[in-house]
Image (spheres, rainbow, N blue to C red):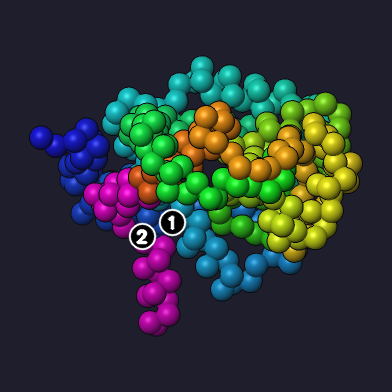
Amino acid sequence: MKSGIAIAAALVVLAASACNDTPVPDDVVARVNGVDITTEYLDAQFARAIAGAEPLPNGEETRDLKLQLLSDIIGNQIMLQLAAAQGLTATDAEVDVQFSEFRNQFTEERFNELLEQQAATVDDVRRDIQESLTIEKLINKEITSRISVSQAEIEEFYDSNVESFDLPESFHVSHILVTPGPDQTIANSTGDDALTSEAAAAKAQTLLRDIQGGQDFATLARQFSEDPTTAASGGDLGYQPMEALAGVDPAFADAIAQMRVGETFPRVVATSFGYHILRLIDRDPGGQKELGDLQVEAQIRQMIFNQRDQILRAAFFETVRNQATIQNFFAQRILDEAGS
Protein backbone atom coordinates (compact mmCIF):
# COMPACT_ATOMS: atom_id res chain seq x y z
CA MET A 1 0.00 0.00 0.00
CA LYS A 2 1.28 3.47 -0.83
CA SER A 3 2.11 5.78 2.06
CA GLY A 4 0.10 8.93 2.73
CA ILE A 5 3.12 10.97 1.62
CA ALA A 6 3.35 9.27 -1.75
CA ILE A 7 -0.39 9.44 -2.39
CA ALA A 8 -0.64 13.14 -1.55
CA ALA A 9 2.42 14.01 -3.60
CA ALA A 10 1.14 11.98 -6.53
CA LEU A 11 -2.20 13.77 -6.41
CA VAL A 12 -0.43 17.13 -6.55
CA VAL A 13 1.61 16.05 -9.56
CA LEU A 14 -1.36 14.54 -11.39
CA ALA A 15 -3.53 17.58 -10.77
CA ALA A 16 -0.82 19.80 -12.23
CA SER A 17 0.12 17.68 -15.24
CA ALA A 18 -2.44 19.29 -17.52
CA CYS A 19 -0.88 22.69 -16.89
CA ASN A 20 2.72 21.86 -17.78
CA ASP A 21 2.35 22.33 -21.55
CA THR A 22 0.81 25.79 -21.39
CA PRO A 23 2.86 28.70 -22.83
CA VAL A 24 5.22 30.39 -20.38
CA PRO A 25 4.46 34.09 -19.79
CA ASP A 26 7.46 36.40 -19.66
CA ASP A 27 6.68 37.32 -16.07
CA VAL A 28 6.93 33.71 -14.79
CA VAL A 29 10.31 32.53 -13.43
CA ALA A 30 9.34 29.00 -12.41
CA ARG A 31 6.45 26.56 -12.38
CA VAL A 32 5.99 24.03 -9.59
CA ASN A 33 3.34 21.37 -10.20
CA GLY A 34 1.58 23.83 -12.49
CA VAL A 35 1.71 26.72 -10.01
CA ASP A 36 3.52 29.78 -11.34
CA ILE A 37 6.15 31.74 -9.44
CA THR A 38 6.25 35.23 -10.89
CA THR A 39 9.08 37.63 -11.56
CA GLU A 40 7.30 40.14 -9.34
CA TYR A 41 7.33 37.71 -6.39
CA LEU A 42 10.99 36.76 -6.90
CA ASP A 43 11.99 40.42 -7.18
CA ALA A 44 10.09 41.28 -4.00
CA GLN A 45 11.79 38.48 -2.08
CA PHE A 46 15.14 39.51 -3.52
CA ALA A 47 14.58 43.11 -2.40
CA ARG A 48 13.93 41.85 1.12
CA ALA A 49 17.03 39.66 1.01
CA ILE A 50 19.35 42.52 0.10
CA ALA A 51 17.67 45.25 2.15
CA GLY A 52 20.40 47.39 3.68
CA ALA A 53 23.23 45.75 1.76
CA GLU A 54 26.15 48.01 0.88
CA PRO A 55 27.33 47.87 -1.81
CA LEU A 56 24.41 46.38 -3.67
CA PRO A 57 25.20 43.18 -5.60
CA ASN A 58 26.33 43.60 -9.20
CA GLY A 59 24.72 41.86 -12.19
CA GLU A 60 26.46 38.50 -11.75
CA GLU A 61 25.97 38.52 -7.99
CA THR A 62 22.30 39.40 -8.46
CA ARG A 63 21.73 36.45 -10.79
CA ASP A 64 23.54 34.10 -8.39
CA LEU A 65 21.55 35.30 -5.38
CA LYS A 66 18.28 35.09 -7.30
CA LEU A 67 19.06 31.53 -8.40
CA GLN A 68 19.66 30.51 -4.78
CA LEU A 69 16.60 32.37 -3.58
CA LEU A 70 14.40 30.85 -6.29
CA SER A 71 15.58 27.36 -5.35
CA ASP A 72 14.46 28.04 -1.76
CA ILE A 73 11.11 29.41 -2.99
CA ILE A 74 10.58 26.30 -5.12
CA GLY A 75 11.35 24.07 -2.16
CA ASN A 76 8.88 25.96 0.03
CA GLN A 77 6.23 25.82 -2.69
CA ILE A 78 6.54 22.03 -2.88
CA MET A 79 6.13 21.71 0.88
CA LEU A 80 3.20 24.15 0.96
CA GLN A 81 1.40 22.28 -1.82
CA LEU A 82 1.88 18.97 -0.05
CA ALA A 83 0.64 20.47 3.22
CA ALA A 84 -2.42 21.88 1.46
CA ALA A 85 -3.18 18.47 -0.06
CA GLN A 86 -3.28 17.07 3.48
CA GLY A 87 -5.35 19.91 4.94
CA LEU A 88 -2.46 21.27 7.00
CA THR A 89 -2.37 24.88 5.81
CA ALA A 90 -2.13 27.19 8.83
CA THR A 91 -5.41 28.99 9.54
CA ASP A 92 -5.87 32.74 9.85
CA ALA A 93 -6.49 32.25 13.57
CA GLU A 94 -3.16 30.43 14.00
CA VAL A 95 -1.38 33.16 12.08
CA ASP A 96 -3.10 35.83 14.18
CA VAL A 97 -1.79 34.28 17.40
CA GLN A 98 1.82 34.09 16.26
CA PHE A 99 1.72 37.49 14.57
CA SER A 100 0.40 39.06 17.78
CA GLU A 101 3.15 37.38 19.82
CA PHE A 102 5.74 38.72 17.40
CA ARG A 103 4.19 42.20 17.09
CA ASN A 104 3.83 42.63 20.86
CA GLN A 105 7.58 42.30 21.34
CA PHE A 106 8.05 45.81 19.94
CA THR A 107 6.82 49.34 20.21
CA GLU A 108 4.98 50.61 17.13
CA GLU A 109 8.02 52.69 16.18
CA ARG A 110 10.43 49.76 16.50
CA PHE A 111 8.09 47.46 14.57
CA ASN A 112 7.83 49.93 11.70
CA GLU A 113 11.62 50.31 11.71
CA LEU A 114 11.98 46.54 11.34
CA LEU A 115 9.56 46.48 8.42
CA GLU A 116 11.49 49.27 6.72
CA GLN A 117 14.85 47.61 7.34
CA GLN A 118 13.58 44.35 5.82
CA ALA A 119 11.73 46.05 2.93
CA ALA A 120 8.67 44.17 4.14
CA THR A 121 5.00 44.86 4.79
CA VAL A 122 2.66 43.47 7.43
CA ASP A 123 1.21 41.20 4.74
CA ASP A 124 4.73 39.91 4.03
CA VAL A 125 5.25 39.09 7.70
CA ARG A 126 1.89 37.35 7.94
CA ARG A 127 2.63 35.32 4.82
CA ASP A 128 6.03 34.31 6.22
CA ILE A 129 4.36 33.20 9.44
CA GLN A 130 1.67 31.23 7.61
CA GLU A 131 4.24 29.46 5.42
CA SER A 132 6.46 28.69 8.41
CA LEU A 133 3.56 27.34 10.48
CA THR A 134 2.25 25.29 7.54
CA ILE A 135 5.60 23.65 6.82
CA GLU A 136 6.13 23.07 10.54
CA LYS A 137 2.76 21.27 10.73
CA LEU A 138 3.68 19.11 7.74
CA ILE A 139 7.10 18.22 9.19
CA ASN A 140 5.53 17.43 12.56
CA LYS A 141 2.93 15.13 10.99
CA GLU A 142 5.23 13.32 8.59
CA ILE A 143 8.46 13.24 10.61
CA THR A 144 8.60 14.58 14.17
CA SER A 145 5.52 12.75 15.45
CA ARG A 146 6.85 9.47 14.05
CA ILE A 147 10.24 9.55 15.77
CA SER A 148 10.55 7.54 18.96
CA VAL A 149 13.58 6.71 21.09
CA SER A 150 13.32 3.66 23.33
CA GLN A 151 14.88 3.20 26.75
CA ALA A 152 16.81 0.24 25.34
CA GLU A 153 18.37 2.50 22.70
CA ILE A 154 19.35 5.03 25.37
CA GLU A 155 20.96 2.31 27.47
CA GLU A 156 22.78 0.86 24.46
CA PHE A 157 24.14 4.27 23.53
CA TYR A 158 25.31 4.90 27.10
CA ASP A 159 27.01 1.51 27.42
CA SER A 160 28.81 2.03 24.11
CA ASN A 161 29.96 5.53 25.07
CA VAL A 162 30.27 5.38 28.86
CA GLU A 163 33.74 6.94 28.84
CA SER A 164 32.38 9.97 27.03
CA PHE A 165 30.20 10.72 30.06
CA ASP A 166 33.23 11.33 32.29
CA LEU A 167 32.86 15.02 31.69
CA PRO A 168 34.79 18.18 32.49
CA GLU A 169 33.05 21.20 33.97
CA SER A 170 30.58 22.42 31.38
CA PHE A 171 28.47 25.49 30.73
CA HIS A 172 24.91 25.51 29.41
CA VAL A 173 24.94 28.46 27.02
CA SER A 174 22.44 30.14 24.73
CA HIS A 175 23.41 32.71 22.16
CA ILE A 176 22.00 34.99 19.50
CA LEU A 177 24.35 35.28 16.53
CA VAL A 178 24.26 38.11 13.99
CA THR A 179 26.52 37.54 10.99
CA PRO A 180 28.15 40.40 9.05
CA GLY A 181 27.08 39.38 5.55
CA PRO A 182 24.31 37.77 3.47
CA ASP A 183 23.45 34.24 4.56
CA GLN A 184 21.38 31.83 2.49
CA THR A 185 20.81 29.50 5.47
CA ILE A 186 18.81 31.91 7.65
CA ALA A 187 16.39 29.85 9.74
CA ASN A 188 14.88 32.40 12.11
CA SER A 189 11.12 32.87 12.05
CA THR A 190 11.21 36.37 10.58
CA GLY A 191 13.83 35.79 7.86
CA ASP A 192 15.80 38.73 9.25
CA ASP A 193 19.39 38.90 7.95
CA ALA A 194 21.95 41.68 8.55
CA LEU A 195 23.91 42.13 5.33
CA THR A 196 26.88 44.25 6.40
CA SER A 197 29.17 44.40 9.42
CA GLU A 198 27.73 47.78 10.39
CA ALA A 199 24.15 46.53 10.13
CA ALA A 200 25.05 43.39 12.09
CA ALA A 201 26.66 45.36 14.92
CA ALA A 202 23.66 47.68 15.11
CA LYS A 203 21.20 44.77 15.07
CA ALA A 204 23.10 42.97 17.85
CA GLN A 205 23.16 46.11 20.02
CA THR A 206 19.44 46.60 19.51
CA LEU A 207 18.68 43.00 20.47
CA LEU A 208 20.87 43.26 23.57
CA ARG A 209 19.00 46.42 24.63
CA ASP A 210 15.68 44.63 24.04
CA ILE A 211 16.81 41.75 26.29
CA GLN A 212 18.10 44.11 28.96
CA GLY A 213 14.73 45.84 28.72
CA GLY A 214 12.95 42.62 29.68
CA GLN A 215 12.19 40.88 26.40
CA ASP A 216 12.54 37.10 26.33
CA PHE A 217 15.96 35.86 25.17
CA ALA A 218 14.73 32.61 23.57
CA THR A 219 11.90 34.35 21.72
CA LEU A 220 14.26 36.93 20.22
CA ALA A 221 16.71 34.16 19.29
CA ARG A 222 13.97 32.31 17.39
CA GLN A 223 12.97 35.50 15.62
CA PHE A 224 16.34 37.09 14.85
CA SER A 225 19.36 34.82 15.44
CA GLU A 226 21.29 34.10 12.25
CA ASP A 227 22.73 30.82 13.52
CA PRO A 228 20.82 28.25 11.40
CA THR A 229 21.51 25.40 13.82
CA THR A 230 20.22 27.04 17.02
CA ALA A 231 17.70 29.75 16.06
CA ALA A 232 14.73 27.37 16.14
CA SER A 233 15.67 26.15 19.64
CA GLY A 234 15.90 29.66 21.06
CA GLY A 235 19.69 29.84 20.68
CA ASP A 236 20.41 26.82 22.90
CA LEU A 237 23.99 25.54 22.48
CA GLY A 238 23.60 22.90 25.19
CA TYR A 239 26.33 22.07 27.72
CA GLN A 240 29.84 22.85 26.47
CA PRO A 241 33.23 22.49 28.19
CA MET A 242 35.41 25.58 28.37
CA GLU A 243 37.80 24.04 25.83
CA ALA A 244 35.01 23.86 23.25
CA LEU A 245 33.91 27.41 24.00
CA ALA A 246 37.49 28.63 23.58
CA GLY A 247 37.58 26.78 20.27
CA VAL A 248 34.77 29.00 19.05
CA ASP A 249 36.76 32.08 19.98
CA PRO A 250 38.78 33.10 23.06
CA ALA A 251 36.51 36.13 23.50
CA PHE A 252 33.50 33.81 23.58
CA ALA A 253 35.05 31.69 26.36
CA ASP A 254 36.28 34.72 28.32
CA ALA A 255 32.76 36.15 28.41
CA ILE A 256 31.24 32.87 29.63
CA ALA A 257 33.88 32.55 32.36
CA GLN A 258 32.83 35.93 33.77
CA MET A 259 29.10 35.18 33.92
CA ARG A 260 26.84 33.99 36.68
CA VAL A 261 24.08 31.45 36.05
CA GLY A 262 21.00 33.18 34.65
CA GLU A 263 22.96 36.22 33.47
CA THR A 264 23.11 37.75 30.00
CA PHE A 265 26.55 39.12 29.20
CA PRO A 266 26.31 42.94 29.34
CA ARG A 267 28.12 43.52 26.05
CA VAL A 268 27.91 42.18 22.52
CA VAL A 269 30.80 39.76 21.93
CA ALA A 270 32.51 39.98 18.54
CA THR A 271 34.13 36.83 17.12
CA SER A 272 35.19 35.63 13.67
CA PHE A 273 31.62 34.31 13.23
CA GLY A 274 29.94 37.63 13.89
CA TYR A 275 28.31 39.30 16.88
CA HIS A 276 27.04 37.23 19.82
CA ILE A 277 24.65 37.92 22.66
CA LEU A 278 25.33 35.33 25.38
CA ARG A 279 23.32 33.90 28.25
CA LEU A 280 24.58 31.38 30.83
CA ILE A 281 21.73 29.05 31.74
CA ASP A 282 23.57 26.59 34.02
CA ARG A 283 26.97 25.21 35.08
CA ASP A 284 27.74 21.54 35.60
CA PRO A 285 30.74 20.55 37.77
CA GLY A 286 31.55 17.53 35.61
CA GLY A 287 32.73 14.04 36.63
CA GLN A 288 31.45 10.61 35.64
CA LYS A 289 27.75 10.79 34.86
CA GLU A 290 25.57 7.77 35.47
CA LEU A 291 22.72 6.65 33.22
CA GLY A 292 20.26 7.26 36.03
CA ASP A 293 21.08 10.97 35.81
CA LEU A 294 18.01 12.54 34.21
CA GLN A 295 20.18 15.05 32.39
CA VAL A 296 22.22 12.23 30.82
CA GLU A 297 19.13 10.37 29.67
CA ALA A 298 17.62 13.54 28.26
CA GLN A 299 20.85 14.37 26.46
CA ILE A 300 21.12 10.91 24.88
CA ARG A 301 17.45 10.88 23.93
CA GLN A 302 17.76 14.31 22.29
CA MET A 303 20.96 13.30 20.49
CA ILE A 304 19.37 10.18 18.97
CA PHE A 305 16.21 12.12 18.16
CA ASN A 306 18.14 14.92 16.43
CA GLN A 307 20.13 12.47 14.32
CA ARG A 308 16.96 10.76 13.11
CA ASP A 309 15.14 14.04 12.61
CA GLN A 310 17.96 15.46 10.48
CA ILE A 311 18.19 12.36 8.28
CA LEU A 312 14.43 12.02 7.86
CA ARG A 313 13.97 15.70 7.02
CA ALA A 314 16.63 15.49 4.32
CA ALA A 315 15.18 12.26 2.92
CA PHE A 316 11.63 13.61 3.04
CA PHE A 317 12.56 16.81 1.23
CA GLU A 318 14.47 14.97 -1.49
CA THR A 319 11.60 12.51 -1.95
CA VAL A 320 8.87 15.12 -2.37
CA ARG A 321 11.14 17.26 -4.56
CA ASN A 322 11.79 14.26 -6.82
CA GLN A 323 8.04 13.67 -7.11
CA ALA A 324 7.34 17.28 -8.06
CA THR A 325 7.23 18.69 -11.58
CA ILE A 326 9.61 21.66 -11.52
CA GLN A 327 10.37 24.03 -14.38
CA ASN A 328 12.94 26.73 -13.58
CA PHE A 329 12.56 29.20 -16.44
CA PHE A 330 14.84 31.76 -14.80
CA ALA A 331 17.75 29.31 -14.82
CA GLN A 332 17.02 28.38 -18.44
CA ARG A 333 16.97 32.03 -19.48
CA ILE A 334 20.37 32.58 -17.89
CA LEU A 335 21.76 29.67 -19.90
CA ASP A 336 20.11 30.94 -23.08
CA GLU A 337 21.59 34.39 -22.58
CA ALA A 338 25.06 32.87 -22.12
CA GLY A 339 24.60 30.86 -25.33
CA SER A 340 23.70 33.94 -27.30
Q: Could you tell whether 167 is left or right of 283 in the image?
A: left
Q: Is residue 325 magenta?
A: yes
Q: Secondary structure at mark 2?
A: strand
Main SS, magenta region, reads helix
Magenta span covers which residues? 314-340
Can residue 37 be seen in this snapshot? no
Dot 2 crowding, Cα within 10 Å, few <14, some 14–19, many 20+? some
**Outermost residue toward the left in this view:** 1
Q: Amino acid at mark 1?
A: Ser
What's the residue at 52%, 67% (across, down)?
A: 64
Q: Residue 59 versus residue 164: which sits nearer the camera? A: 164
Q: Residue 246 versus residue 232: which sits nearer the camera? A: 246
Q: Position of residue 18 (x, y in %)?
A: 18, 45
Q: Amino acid at mark 2?
A: Asn
Q: Position of residue 134 (x, y in %)?
A: 44, 31
Which quadrant holds residue 108? top right
Q: Position of residue 22 (x, y in %)?
A: 24, 52
Disc 2 versus disc 1: nearer the observer: 1
Q: Are marks 2 and 1 in contact (CB under 8 Å)?
A: yes
User: What residue did someone put label 2 on?
Assistant: 328
What's the residue at 55%, 36% (across, down)?
A: 290
Counting residues from the N terminus, which is met first, the one under dot 2 or under dot 1?
1
User: What residue did someone put label 1 on?
Assistant: 71
